[in-house]
Amino acid sequence: MRLSAKQRLVLSWWCEASPYRDREAIICDGAVRSGKTFAMTLSFFCWAMSQFNGAGFALCGVSAAAVRRNVLDPVRPALEELGFQLRERWGVGYIEVRFRGRENRVYLFGGGDKASAGRIQGITLAGVMLDEVTLMKREFVEQAVARCSDRGARVWFSCNPEGPEHWFYKEWVLRAQERRALRVRFVMGDNPALSRETLERYERSFRGAFYRRFVLGEWAVTEGRVYDFFEEDMAQNVPEGDFQEWRISCDYGTVNPTSMGLWGRQGENWYRVKEFYYDARKEGRQKTDREYVRDLERLAGGRHIRRVVVDPSAVSFMAALRQEGWPVAAADNEVLTGIRVTADLLRRGRLVICRTCRETLREMFLYCWDEKAPGDKVVKRFDHAMDDMRYFAMSLGRGESFVGGFAVERGGAGEWR
C-alpha cells in the first residue's frame, strides 16, 4: 500500500513515538480526492483497537448512508487484510469490531439534519470521527465532541473547505493549537493513488471558488457564477434509446416563476430532457395549484413517474398532487450542500442538461454568488430552475438505492467477516 508523507503522519500521530501523541484531536482538511478520509479512517480504527477494549466509538457523516459509502466501505478491504473482523448490525446502528483479542463497538450517526443532535445525546464514547464535518449541524458536532468523556478519548475531523466565515474554520481550524488539535492540510498531490492524468482532469474540471476549495484546498470566498465550470458545450441532445426511470423536480412559485424538470435515467446518468417554466409576473396571471398539476401531467407526457420532488414550502401544491395520485416527496432544501452535490454530479456527467431545457441553461449562466453578503449566499434571482435541479440532485443520495455510487440503506444483522 503506497502512502504519502501526510497519510503516514495521520496514521501515526497518536503513537507513542510521535511528537503529536499528546494532541486531543486531529483535523484533516483540504482538496477532494486527496486521500485524507482513507488515511484517517484506517488510523481511527487502528488507534481505537490498540488503545481500548469494550469501549464505544462513533463514525459520523452527513447521513448514516454517507458514512457507509464514503468512510466505511473504502477502508474495509484494508482493515480485513490487517486482520480486523467487522460484524455489521445495521438494524441497531452499529458495527462490532474485533482485533487481536479486543472487541469494541462503533456506532454510525448522521449529523446533517435538525434532529441529529438528539440522536447522539446521552451516549458515552472513547472517540468520534466526523467526516465532512462542515456539512453537519453545529449542534450535532458539539454534542458529539461532548460525548467523548472516556479517559484518553480523541476527536477526529475531516472536511473539504467551505468559506472563511464557516463556524468550523473559525472555531477549530484557526484555533487548532489552542484546542490541542493537530491540523494536516491535504492537496490532491498527497494521494498517491491518483494518476497524473486524473490530477490534470480535476485541474480542468473546476474554476473559481470551486477550484480554490476543492483542488487547492483553500477556505476561499465565493465569487462570480455558482456553476462557473459549466460551459455551453456541456449541454447535450436528448439521448436516443430507452430510459430506465423517470422523475420530476419542482420549484413552486405564485408570483415568482414555477420551474419543473423531467429527468430520465440511462445507466448511471440522469438527463434533464424537458422542462416547464412559468413566470406569473411576465405572463400577467397567477396560476392555481390545480393548473400546475395539469402542467406537471403534460410534462410527464404519460410516462411512469417514480417520484415528484417538490419545494418543501409548497404545501398546498404537494397536497393537490397527492390527491391526483402522484408520488410526492418534499425536497431537501439545504442550499449550500445542495449546490455542492449538484456541482459534483454535473462535473462528473451524472447530471446532464439537454439542449431542450432553455430556461435551465439560461439560469446556469446567471446564477451567481452574492459577493456583498457575509458567508456563502446566492443572489435570489435567476434561481428557479437552479432550485428544482438542486432538489433533484439532493434526492439522489437520501435513503434509498440508486445507481451511480449512491447509498443503499440496509437493515438486519450481519455475520463476522
Image: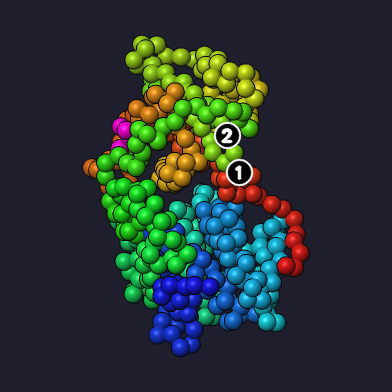
Disc 2 marks a residue whose amino acid type is: Arg
Q: Is residue 367 magenta?
A: yes
Q: Position of residue 301 (x, y in %)?
A: 58, 18
Residue at the image point whose x is 63% and y is 76% from the top: 82
> Residue tagged by mark 2?
265
Q: Is 89 in front, or is 343? A: 343
Task: Note whether 320 is above or below 111 in the view shown.
Answer: above
Q: Is 116 in front, or is 129? A: 129
Helix, strand or loop: magenta stretch: loop
- Identify the mark at residue 403; answer none if there is no mark: 1
Residue at the image point whose x is 35% and y is 30% from the top: 363
- Identify the mark at residue 11; answer none if there is no mark: none
Residue at the image point whose x is 49% and y is 15% from the top: 288
Secondary-structure class at tag 2: strand
Side (left or right) of 253 relative to 301: left
Precedes in sequence: disc 1 or disc 2:
2
Quadrant location of residue 46? bottom right
Contact (CB < 8 A) between labels 1 and 2?
yes
Task: Note whether 7 is above or below 316 in the view shown.
Answer: below
Q: Few, some or many C-alpha atoms within 10 Å of disc 2 (few <14, some 14-19, many ≥20)?
A: some
